[in-house]
Image (cartoon, rainbow, N blue to C red):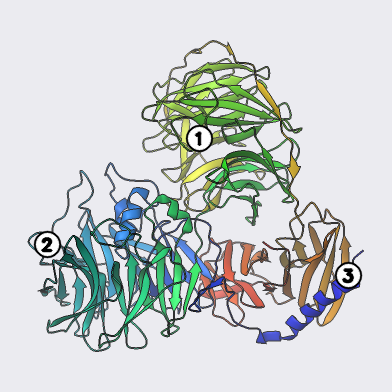
Amino acid sequence: MLGSALRRPALIILLLLLAMGPFWAISSPVESVNAQGVSEFPIPSQGPSFYGGVTAGPDAAIWYVDMTRSKIGRIAPGGAVTEFALPVSATSYYNSYPTSPYTSPYPYNSSYYGPYYNSYGTSVPSIATGPDGALWFAMGNAIGRMTTSGAVTQYPLPTENTFPTSITAGPDGALWFTQTTSYSSPGYPASTTPKIGRITTSGVITQFPVSMGGYPAYGSSYPTSITAGPDGALWYTGSYSIGRITTAGVVTDYPIPSVGSSVNLTPGITAGSDGALWFTGTTYVPSPGSTTQQGIVGRITTAGALSGFPLPTAGLTPSGITKGPDGALWFLESSNTSVYPPGTPSPAPPGKIARITTTGAVTEYSPPSTSRSPVSITAGPDGALWFTENPTASTSSALPQGGKIGRITTGGATSEFTLPGSSFPETITTGPDGALWFVEQTTNKIGRVTINGAITEFATPLGAQLASIAAGPDGALWFTGSLSTSAVGYSVKLGRITTGGILSEHPLPATSGTPNMIVAGPDGALWFTETASTYYSPYPTYPGTSGYASRIGRFSLSGTVTEYPLTTANAVVNDLAVGSDGAIWFTASIMDTTTGAVQGGRVGRLAMSGEITEFSPVTSGVGAFSIALGRDGALWFTVGSNSLLAGKIGRITTGGVVTEFTLPSGTSAADLATGPDGAIWFADFLGSKIGRITAGGAVTQFTIPTPGSGPYAIAAGPDGAMWFTEQYGNKIGRIPVSDQGPGTPAATATPVPPSSTPTRTATPTRTAIATTPAAVIGGRGLGISADNGGVHLAWQGGTVQTGYTVARLANGVVTMSLATLGPSATSFTDTSAPQGLDCYALMIATPAGQRLSDLECVVVGSRTASGSPEAFTLRLNQTSTANLTWTPPAGGSQDGYALLTYGGPPQPLNATATSATTTANGLSCYALAAMSGGSMAGYTDWTCAMPGFGNLGP
C-alpha cells in the first residue's frame, strides 16, 4: 500500500511546476562547472567523433563538419542537434583516393587521425554559408552544397588528386576555396601547382594557379585558408606567405619575413574591424640546447604592410581566426602533442580560446575540457563565438572521448555540447516479441526496433564490449560481452535481457576465451564461440596452449558451461548456426601465428555428442566466416580473406558436399541470412548494398539510401522483410522481400567431396556458474504518446518493484491514483484523458520506499485532423535530453519534417528521419509537423517533459 505521506509531496510539486504555465525557465542543465565558472552542457554521446569547420548558418543555427562519420551537423538555437549523412569519405581528403591502394572503406583512417589532428588541429575541411542560403563545404575531391533541409549536391573538381580545405563566400556572389594535394599518397601522382578555386552557386568551377613563396630549405607551399578582404579581393594563407587574388584572377604574393629560424603560418585568416587582414602562425626560435615554439598573430594591410604580435603561452599552435561581434579578433590555440618541434612542453599545455584587440592586447580562456583542443571557430548569430573541439591524445585510446561543440561569450563564459556519435550497431535478430533486437558495440547497449521503426535502448550491466545477440529458448534475448582493463583484468560474460528490459549477467569460467557469436541450440541451451591467443593481446590465453585456439561453448539455462576445443591448430571460430540435422555448424579461419593473417578456412559440424567434423572450402588460403541454414537444408557461408572482404558465398550439404559461388566484382558479403523467399540475403559492407543469391547462384544487388554506411549484419524480420544494421551510418535498415526481380547468375564452382574425416574431441570441461539477475527498479524510460485511442504510457520493467500507481494532472484536477498496476506492468493507456494539458508520473513501490518516474505531458486534441506523423513519442530516460521517435504519416507523402519547440524556432529534419534528440530546458514542449512543398501537411499533439522530476536515476 502506498502511503499518502509519500504521494502527496510529489503531486504538490507537480502542481507547482505546471502552474508556472509558459513562464518556465529557459536554462540548460549544467554538467560541470570549473573554477572560472565555466559550465558544460551534455548532449548524449554515443561514440568517437572528430569535428572540423563550424559556421553560422542562414537559419540562425550553428552548422559543423563531423570528420569521423562524414556528416554535417546543425545545432538549433535551443540546442537541438540534427546530423545529415554525407557520401562516403566526403570530408577527409586522406580518404579520397579512388584508386589508391590506401583507400579505406571506413569513414576515417585511424592511422592518420592522431598526428593529423593533434599537430594541425584546424587543417580540416571547412564549411561556409553561401549567398544562396545553402551551406557549402569541402568534401574529398569535390565541393559540396547542402540545403538547410539536408539535401546534398556534389561538384567534383576538374583537377584530380587535389582537395579543397577552406571555403568562403566571395564578394562576387560565388564561393572561393583553397586546394591542397595528396603529396603523402604513395603511388599517386601529386599535383605540384598551388591553386585557388571559384565555384558559382550553379556549380561552375574555375581554378587559378597561384605562386606562393617559401624558404629555400622548405620550398613552396599550398594555400590552406581563405577569406574575403575589405578591398573586394580574396586573401589566403600558405605556410610561408600571404596571398591576394582579385575576382578577375590577378595574384599577388607577400612572403612572411623570418623571425628567429622561420615562421610557419597556420590555417586561419580573416578581415578585422580595422580594415586589415589578420592571420595566425608559429615561429621556432633556436636557443642553446633547444628550440622554442612561439605562437604569433599577424596583421597585413591591404597595401601589404606586415606586423605581428607574440602570444603569451608557449607550446600552443594558434589558428582559425575570426572577427568577433565585439570588434576584436578571436582565435584558437591548439595543443600540439607531437614530438616536433624540440622544446615543445610534454605533455603539451591544454588548448585555449584567445582574443586579441586591434591594438594587440591578448586574453586567453581555457575551455572546460582540458583533454581537448579547439579546432575551428566562428561568430554565432547569438552574439557569442562557437567552436569545435577534438581530443588531444594521439593514440586511438582517446577516440571514445569524442569531440564537442563549444560556445564562449565575448565576456569569456564558455559552454560545451557533446555531440551524438556512432553506436556501431552490429548483429541483429528477431525477438520473441515481434521486434528486432541488436547490439551497439561502442555504447554497450542493447537496442530494440519495432517493425514501425520505434527504437528503444537498454544500457547493459556488463561494462563490456558487446558482440552478438540471439533469441534464447526461454523467451529472452542472450548476448555476449568481454572486458579487458588493468583494474579487473580480462572478464568474459553472457548477458540476458527480457523483452521488458530486465537485464542479468552470467560470468563464464576464468579459463574461457573471448565470447563472440551466440545461437540457441536444438537442445534448449545457448551455444557460443570463444577465442584465445598468445599472439593477439585483446584475447585471453587458454592454460597450456599457444598460438590461436578456439572453443565452442555451451551454456545451459541452469548455468552449466561445457566447452569443446577445435581439432585444427590455430583455428579461430567465426560463426555458428543450427543445421537441419540437429547439429551445430560453424565456420573458422586458420591464422598465421607470425603475421596474424588468414591462411585457410574450415566449415565444421559439432554433434550433440561432442564429435567434430571439419570440411575445407573449395578456395584455399581464405577463411570461412558468416554461416546460416538455408531453406534447402544446406548451410550457406561466406568465403574471403577477412569477414568484410568475402567475395564468395559457399554452400555445404549436411553430407559435406561443398559448392562456391563467386560474387560480382566489387561485391563482398559481411553477413548472410535466409529470407522468407527461400533465397540467401547478404550485407555488402564495402559496397553499401544488400545482396540476394538464389540456390542456383543468381545474384541481385540493391543499393541502400546512405552511401558508405557499412551494412554489417542481416536477419529476417517478423514482417516478411530483411532487416540489417549499418555500422557507420548508425542506422537500422529494412528491405522488403517480395517482387525483387531476377538477378545475374554468378560463377559457380565445382562441387567437391568432404576433405576431412570425423575426429573425436577431447573430453569436454563442465563448470557450474551461479547466475543472479541484476536488481532493477521498473519505471525507467517512461514514454508518452497520444492518438484517438487515448494517452499511452510505456516503461521498462524491473525486478524489485511491488507495484505502480499512475498519477495524472488534467486541467487542474489531480487524480492521485488513476490506476494501480501490478509489478509486471510495463504500459498503461488512459482512455479517459480529457482535452487539454494532461500530465502523468509513475509512483513505483519498492521494499526500500517509493520512487518517482519522469514527469511527462501531452496536450490532448492539439494535433491536426489529418496529415500528422504517427506514434510521436517522448522519453526523457531520466536525463535532460528529450528523445523523440515517430513513424511517417499515413501515405508517407512528406518531403521533410519540422520539429516544433514551444518558445523556440522550428528545426527542419529530412524526410527519412524517424527520431531526434534535443535538450529539455525546464518544462519543455514539442510537436512534430510533416512538411510538403514548404507547408505543414499536419502536426502531432504537443508533448512535454520536466527534467529532474523523477528519482530513479539513469
Callout 2: helix, strand or loop?
loop
Please provide percent x and percent y for residue 36. Answer: 48, 78
Task: Say which quadrant the C terminus sits in.
Answer: bottom right
At horizontal 44% and vertical 62% (from top left) the residue drawn is: 403
* Residue tagged 2: 220
Tell me the element at label 1. loop
Q: Position of residue 652 (x, y in %)?
A: 53, 21
Is 183 drawn above or below residue 120 in the view shown? above
Residue marked by disc 1? 539
Kind of residue at badge 3: Ser
Query: Which picture quadrant has residue 453?
Result: bottom right
Q: Is residue 616 visible to us here?
A: yes
Q: Amino acid at mark 1?
A: Tyr
Q: Quadrant of residue 796?
A: bottom right
Which circle, 3 or 2, is nearer the viewer?
2
Q: Answer few, some or many: residues within 10 Å of disc 3's Cα (few below 14, many 20 plus, some between 14 and 19).
A: some
Q: Earlier in the sequence, mark 3 or mark 1?
A: 1
In the foreground, 213 or 696: 213
Numbered disc total: 3
For the view shown, which residue lies furthest in the right direction? 1
Q: Quickly name the residue at label 3.
A: 817
**From where the camera sits, is residue 834 visible?**
no
